Each structure stands twice: as structure tokens, then as C-alpha cells.
Amino acid sequence: MSSRGRPRTNKEPKRKAVRLRLCARMNAGRVMEPYTIMEGLIATVRKDLSDIKIGIVWHTGWRPDADGIRTMGKAIKNSETERQRTDIDWDIQISEPVWGALDARGKERLIFHELEHIQIVHDKDGGVMLDDKSRVVTRAMAIDGARGAILFWLDNIKLAGNADARRSLAARRDQMKEQVAEQLQNVIGQQAEEFAEDPAPGSDESDEEL
Ligand SMILES: [Zn+2]
């Protein structure tokens, strides 16, 4: 018997909390805020994701880790059966309490950050890879790298509940900066090699990009 509320009887088993709730794109004739932001980003800075179907899911909030850091959101690639059943390729889960605490720019950075986890797979010739159902192939980018991530981590630090969490986040951010720098170095190195191997410009007539 708990000290608060009614004692539970055998007929009322304790219920497991459901922490996820689908966020419908439309509510009362209006596009919901996370979708407005996501669609704005896809229309401008993430046009490569135009053909990927992404759903928003509210999360009631993750438990803090040992340092007191709470997850703000997650990008999750749906399984093949989920994709066929729902027509949604990826879910972005957003912590509802975090969302309520972020300002407009922070919200945009959070969605941008989650979208960064979704990467389009290209074939050897640089074209978008399709599967045999003519869907764009994507993969999850595990490392929080590259564009926008540093700013996102500043929001994360701002919202962190205690000094331990802030210190730990700051250390992770600094570590990430190094990883991003390293990744960039690798990409630049690869491009330099590919450039050296490339035939002279203009020799390939299919080279007609705008
Ligand atoms: Zn992330």
C-alpha cells in the first residue's frame, strides 16, 4: 500500500507508463509546431531529405543519466515492417518538457540536430541510392557531428539541471569539437585524393549539375 492515494487492490494492477504519444501533423486545421519547423528546415537546408517521410513523436521525458543530463530528442530509423505498415521512414522523438523550455531558435536547433542523424546514402557515382521499392536509402549517423551540433549542445548545457551536468556536457561538447575537426580533416583528405584521381574537367558529358 502506498502512502499517497488509494491503496491498490489486486484488481488494480500497477500500470506501466506509456511515455510516447504520436504528434499528428495537423491539429484544428493547423500544422503543429514541430512539423512547421521540420518542414521549413527540409525546404531550405536539408532538401536532400525531401523524399524521406518523418514522423514526430512526443516523449514525456527521459530519465537523467548519472551526470543529470536529459536526452532532448532522438532520431530513430523505423524497421522495414514499420515502414511498410505506416509509410513513415523515420521518427523524431522530442522530449515534451524540453520542448516547452526551449525558445524558437532552440527548437529549430533541436529539430535540425535530429535531422542531422538522418543521412542519405549515395552510390559510388554520387547519385542517391534507391532500394528496389524506389525509396531513398538512408542511414543513421551515430556521431553528433558537423553542422549545428555545437549550438545544439549550448542549448543542452543551458537546460542542464545542475553544475555536474553542465560540466559533463561542456566536456562532451569539447570532445565533439575535436571529433568534428578530425572528420572534416578526413573528408578534405579524401576529396583531395579523389580530385587527384579525377579525369580533366569537361571530359564527362553527364556532368551537368545546376
Ligand atoms: Zn544527437
Image (tube, grey):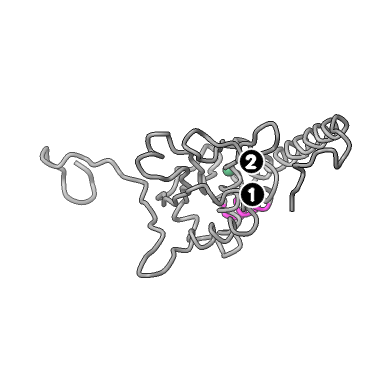
According to the image, label 2 marks what residue?
Answer: 144
Q: Is 82 displayed left or right of 69 in the figure?
A: left
Q: Amino acid at mark 1?
A: Trp
Picture quarter containing residue 141?
Answer: top right
How crowded pointer 1 is (Cα within 10 Å; few <14, some 14-19, many 20+) is rated as many
Q: Quadrant of the N terminus?
A: top left
Q: Is residue 136 magenta?
A: no
Is the shortest distance between ligand 1 and the CB of mark 2 under 8 Å? yes
Residue 188 image position (x, y, % from top left): 82, 37
Q: Is residue 157 magenta?
A: yes
Q: Amino acid at mark 2?
A: Asp
Q: Which mark is residue 32?
A: none
Please report whichever mark, 2 or 1, sits nearer to the chain's N-terminal start. Answer: 2
Q: Is 129 displayed left or right of 92 in the figure?
A: right
Residue span colored magenta: 151-159
SS class, disc 2: loop
Labelled pair 2, 1 in contact (Cβ < 8 Å): yes
According to the image, label 1 marks what residue?
Answer: 153
Question: In terms of depth relative to the viewer, which is nearer, 121 or 178?
Answer: 121
Which residue does the image show at 56% across and 52% down from the upper left? 50
